[in-house]
Image (spheres, rainbow, N blue to C red):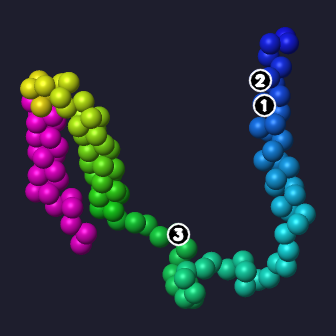
Amino acid sequence: MVEYAPILIFLAVAAAFPAATLVIARLLRPSSPDAVKGEAYECGVPTSGEAIARYPVRFYIIAVLFVVFDVETIFLFPWAVKYRALGLFGFVEMLVFLGILVVGYAYAWKKGALEWV
């Protein structure tokens, strides 16, 4: 049981620190509730319409495509670091990888997934 003491101390500190921080912040902060402060805020402009709006599916498609291509291009960095060690085989593999990316990009472009309107 003694060997687990550091872990238990760490867990106790990890649980106590956020709780203590929130309690101290609540005690120290100024509090003056007001009806105006509870309203929705849109860059200083009075709100118009519902607070919950539906976004078109196209927005999500573009966001997912951005994440996919962004993550895929991150794979280029380790390849560039080990380029000399990988030799011709690594070069050909990266060409195949980039070819797949280009085909996916061309497909998305052809389907009109990259257009905002």
Query: Circle 2 sits in a helix, a strand or a loop, which is it?
Result: helix
Picture quarter with the N terminus: top right
Q: Which residue is mark 1?
A: 11
Label 2 crowd bin: few (<14), some (14–19), many (20+), radius 10 Å: few
Region rendered in magenta: 92-117
- Where residue 104 appears, as percent x and y from the top left, is 16, 46
42 on left or right of 88: right
Q: Which residue occupies 54% across, 82% down? A: 43
Place residue 57 in its image quadrant.
Answer: bottom left
Q: Nearer the viewer, residue 113 or 84?
A: 84
Label 1 crowd bin: few (<14), some (14–19), many (20+), radius 10 Å: few
Q: Which residue occupies 24% across, 30% down? A: 82
Q: Which residue is mark 2?
A: 7
Asked if marks 2 and 1 touch (Cβ < 8 Å), the reply is yes
Q: Amino acid at mark 1?
A: Leu
Per the model, the C-alpha gap separating discs 2 and 1 is 6 Å
Per the model, the C-alpha gap separating discs 3 and 2 is 44 Å
57 on left or right of 50: left
Q: Amino acid at mark 3?
A: Ile
- Where residue 30 appears, as percent x and y from the top left, is 85, 74
